[in-house]
Image (cartoon, coloured by chain):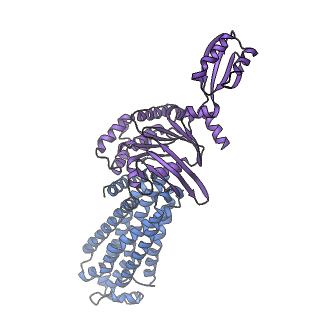
Amino acid sequence: MIQTENLTKRFANTLAVDRLTLQVNEGEVFGFLGPNGAGKTTTVRMLTSLIAPTNGTAIVNGFQIGKEDIEIRRTVGILTETPGMYDSLSAEYNLRIYASLYEVEDAKGQVEKYLRMLGLWERRFDEAGTFSKGMKQKLAIARALLHEPKILFLDEPTAALDPESAHLVRDFIEELRKEGRTIFLCTHNLDEADRLCDRVGVFKTHLLVMDTPARLRSKLFGKKVVFHLRAVNEELVKIVSSLPFIRETKTMDNKIIVTLDNPEEHNPDIIRVLVEAGAGVQFVGELRHSLEEVYLQLVQNA
Amino acid sequence: MDKITTIIKKEWAEVFKNRMVIFTVAFLPVIMTILPLVILYTTRDTGSMGDLGNVTNEMPAQFSAFCSSNLNSGECFQVYIVSIFMLMFMIIPVAIPATISAYSIVGEKATHSLEPLLATPITTLELLIGKSLASAIPAVLATYMAFGVYALGAWIIIPNKFLLAALLDLRWFIAIFIVGPLIAVMAINFTIIVSSRVTDPRVAEQLSMVVIVPILAGFFGQMTGFFLINRRIITIIALVMIVLDAGLFYLAERLFQRETILTRWK
């Protein structure tokens, strides 16, 4: 659905996006992560044909940016980082304007559908300026969806929202994902990316890494398994460390934490040697690194 | 065309909720219409006074061209005074579009609603035309209506058909119906250029009012007898305005590009 090759954007002496090459598949939620000023918004603007790249190419929904810009804008939806509304106009009229600009056939029906879906139907005649931040964000999401775009670009959709509103927006993104829409999600919220995204790309002017959150954890930190024992002693640690597939062993209280590449295959072996050595194995669990740890490791080393 | 209409309707729905805009659109034409009519009414007896001697001698020499043999010097004086104030009509097509476009462009920029709008399949030209027409149409209509009311008032107040013909001379029809829209276009393009550099609609509006300066120069030029606007001058002004408008439109269109708006309009 989205394919870029060496996509580059330079503003005067500033290189905003450097040779970005990525592919986002149909129905995928792709998280685009990076610090402020990394070039995420510039990338979204290029992919939605708002600005032209300096170099490189991109195909969005089968259309080439720079050549088929109107077609791209017609088939993608965008929630901008600061999605302004016409505050003095009603919520319904705000959406009707966009339905007309997107040439939506059943404009009235689409406006009603999304106002109801996002819980704004009862407030449809109220001026958008009277809405809370969360309601405005929902209205902006409705605006981005009116023309049923196949690809949706969401630039920081939950930034500056209270936890309840953010939760609602996240749930709605989950719904969109179930509908099979392709979503390009720029976010600072790494828990959100972890929860919603099939794959993530960490970006700082250029793409640092791109993979599923689980594989990124594994690549950077390996997989860690925690063995809760009745008691830990040096002998047990030595036995586990001597196993050929163990990369690292640590202890904490009555736990042995091991790093290995393939826990699914080797956990039974570890349990067997521990039991044979007389250890009382109480629980076995996976120690998950947060996506935040992955992100920080990547960005700080970039 | 549908998209242009949508933009125009949206602009009107939005800007006409602003009291400042309503005041400018409604109040200014009323003042500009009342002023020459009041002058005509208060000087209605001047014509019957016949020869005013020294007073008419102080009028610009080229004014005698308008002062036909059918009019006595008192009536010539009326034509002269009204001619001075007729230029004030030209302020309407400057002030109204400057106010509307300042709010419509800078306002949109300030509320961050321009980016989602630019992300729709509307072309830059459609957007620019929509915004320009939304500002120009009320301005031109208000100018025409104001002039219409003035003409009607003059017809009621002035019984002398020769004096009426002199007051409603062709040069004022050229000024109102040709130069007026050209001035409106100039004011809009100028506001767009100014809007690319400011973030407050009021600043944009005030800076755009610079376009009034040539009109005021014309007003004071006539008043002091430096020159008098005749048909030849107004035709030259119209031609110069066409060239100026083309140049300003080119500049405004260059500035009103998606990338420029998003990356340089701060």
* Residue at the (41%, 35%) spot, across then down: A176
* Residue at the (54%, 52%) spot, across then down: A6
> Which residue is more in the foreground, A278 or A243?
A243
Quarter occupied by residue B122: bottom left
Quadrant holding the C terminus of chain B: bottom right
Q: Is residue B169 visible?
A: no
Quadrant holding the N terminus of chain B: bottom left
> Which residue is more in the foreground, B182 or B37?
B182
Q: Position of residue B106 (x, y in %)?
A: 48, 57
Q: Is residue A137 visible?
A: yes
Query: Chain B's shade in the image?
Result: blue
Examine the rendered structure and indicate whether residue A83 appears above or below residue B54: above
- Quick one: which chain is purple? A
> Which residue is more in the foreground, A139 or A192?
A192
* B257 left or right of B16 in image: right
* A175 left or right of A42 in image: left
* B43 left or right of B188 in image: left
> Which residue is more in the foreground, B177 or A184?
A184
* Residue at the (29%, 83%) spot, across then down: B48
Quarter occupied by residue A146: top left
